[in-house]
Image (tube, helix red, strand yellow):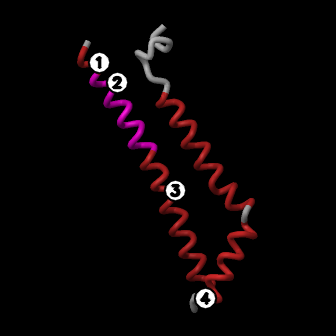
């Protein structure tokens, strides 16, 4: 009944599921669009004097950085909803 009256949140399990879905789908999407990524890499190598190893290292650092930001975003949302639940618990 708490679910129907919005007294309890379902957001935390849904946020966790969305996090894992995104964490798995982002690498899969990059693998699926790897021809597009290779074209961008070739354009960067022709425009700037970058070696292949530096370009791969740069892509890896960006990928890991974006995955960390993805995780931090969901941690912020989950922390926010847990804080609301805790404040509701203190009010009753």
Quote the CA–CA distance across marks 2 and 4: 52 Å
Q: Secondary structure at mark 4?
A: helix
Quote the CA–CA distance across marks 1 and 2: 6 Å
User: Circle 4 is placed at which residue position?
Assistant: 47
Quote the CA–CA distance across marks 1 and 4: 58 Å
Q: Nearer the viewer, mark 1 or mark 4?
A: 4
Q: Residue at x 48, y 29 (%)?
A: 11
Q: Are marks 3 and 2 in contact (CB under 8 Å)?
A: no
Horizontal placement of 34 versus 72: left or right?
right
User: How many C-alpha atoms fall within 10 Å of the one at disc 1: few (<14), some, or many (≥20)?
Assistant: few
**Vertically, is 26 above or below 78?**
below
Quote the CA–CA distance across marks 3 and 2: 27 Å
Q: Secondary structure at mark 2?
A: helix
User: How many C-alpha atoms fall within 10 Å of the one at disc 2: few (<14), some, or many (≥20)?
Assistant: some
User: Circle 3 is placed at which residue position?
Assistant: 67
The disc placed on residue 89 is 1
**Vertically, is 63 above or below 12?**
below
Quote the CA–CA distance across marks 1 and 3: 33 Å
Q: Nearer the viewer, mark 4 or mark 3?
A: 4
Residue 85 falls within the magenta-colored stretch? yes
Instruction: Please report whichever mark, 4 or 3, sits nearer to the chain's N-terminal start.
Output: 4
User: Circle 2 is placed at which residue position?
Assistant: 85
Question: Looking at the figure, which quarter contains the C terminus?
Answer: top left
Query: Chief secondary structure of the magenta span?
Result: helix
In magenta, the rendered stretch is 74-87
Q: Residue at x 62, y 54 (%)?
A: 26
Q: Position of residue 58 (x, y in %)?
A: 54, 75
Q: Residue at x 56, y 82 (%)?
A: 54
Instruction: Please report whichever mark, 2 or 4, sits nearer to the chain's N-terminal start.
Output: 4
Q: Secondary structure at mark 1?
A: helix
Q: Are marks 1 and 2 in contact (CB under 8 Å)?
A: yes
Q: Position of residue 67 (x, y in %)?
A: 52, 56
């Amino acid at each position: 009944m708490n679910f129907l009256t919005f007294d309890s949140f379902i957001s935390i399990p849904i946020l966790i599921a969305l996090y894992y879905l995104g964490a798995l789908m982002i690498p899969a999407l990059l693998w699926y669009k790897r021809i597009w990524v290779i074209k961008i890499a070739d354009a960067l190598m022709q425009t700037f004097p970058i070696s292949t190893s530096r370009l791969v290292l740069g892509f890896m650092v960006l990928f890991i950085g974006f995955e960390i930001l993805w995780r931090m975003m969901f941690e912020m949302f989950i922390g926010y909803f847990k804080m609301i639940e805790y404040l509701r618990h203190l009010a009753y």
